[in-house]
Amino acid sequence: MAISLGFGGATLTNLKSLGESLQLLDAAYQRGIRHFDTAPLYGQGYSEVIYGKFLKDKRKQITLTSNFGLVEANNTDKLPVSLILPLNFLVKSLKKKMKGSGSEVQQNYSLSTPKRIDKSFIERSLEKSLKRLHTDYLDYFLLHEGVPSFLTDDGIAYLLQLKKEGKVLHTGIGSNVNVIKTLTPKDVEQWDVLQYEYSDAREVMAKFPDKIHFHHSCLKNIGDEKNKNVPSEERGGFLLAEAARSNPKGKVIFSTRSQSSLKKNIDGFLKYAAK
């Protein structure tokens, strides 16, 4: 049974092995999740590599989002993901023991968004993502932490061309909710999807009623007073169900590195979504 939850791949490269990452994704799939989200930024492209291995026999059964606009991941051919994950895990563990930051692989990249995103940038990003993901199309292709004005005219024309060709089925903007709130309906008229934090979701959905809305970061409010009447182990699922009810045509995306947390959140979601 497919459910209206999506799984985010930002933390996949934090696990100690490729096997653990694939088991986590498979556990999400077995519990009904059919929407998956990733980006070149996540683990310097290795999150996409992991998804590429996971999706080989499932591509037609799921919807898949990747992003463009922040960075280009170029080095995933130099070291296999089966080696990168344990190395990354070891480095992080050592940093924690030394009371360091435990920074993730992806933080080696600058997070400053390009101010001029043209066709060539988008084309390179898409082709590399498709190669890592072992797919010939994306269901959703989102501008990552940017605004439409960053794109050149040929960049916008290229996105429209990709939709006509079927290499991208939907385009969208994935950014901070406060950035999304500054946009106008005219700004987003050529975009299909808006992805942002769940906070202020009702305001954004009312402003852009004709768009598909993807929400994330719903679980940050688990400790809120209004949730105290819900058993602690069910609060994550309760919040996900609450978000999904308010957005029946979209998706609610969450992430975890733990199979037990995954099970707990999905089971709680199914319980409260049915009420």
Image: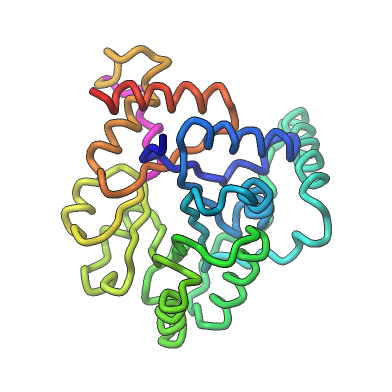
Please indicate whether residue 10 sits to the left or right of residue 213 in the image: right
Of 247 and 68, the residue lying toward us: 247
Residue 130: in magenta span: no
> Which residue: 22% across, 40% down?
246
> Which residue: 57% across, 48% down?
58
Please indicate whether residue 83 sits to the left or right of residue 224 in the image: right
* Residues rendered magenta in the picture: 215-225
Outermost residue toward the left?
206
Q: In which quarter of the image is residue 148?
A: bottom left
Q: Where is residue 122 in the image (x, y as percent from the top left)?
A: 54, 75
Q: In which quarter of the image is residue 17?
A: top right
Q: Where is residue 146 in the image (x, y as percent from the top left)?
A: 43, 66
Q: Quadrant of residue 133?
A: bottom right
Of 215 and 54, the residue lying toward us: 54
> Which residue: 83% across, 45% down?
83
Q: Where is residue 182 in the image (x, y as percent from the top left)?
A: 26, 63
Identify the image's colour scheme: rainbow, by chain, secondary structure or one colour: rainbow
Please indicate whether residue 183 sits to the left or right of residue 260 in the image: left
Outermost residue toward the bottom?
154
Q: What is the total number of numbered labels drawn onto the structure image?
A: 0
User: The N terminus appears in which quarter of the rendering?
Assistant: top left
Q: Tell me if I can see residue 107 in this picture.
A: no
> Which residue: 36% across, 21% down?
235
Q: Where is residue 121 in the image (x, y as percent from the top left)?
A: 57, 78
**Residue 162 vertical placement versus 68 (above, below):** below
Q: Tell me if I can see residue 161 in this picture.
A: yes
User: The C terminus appears in which quarter of the rendering?
Assistant: top left
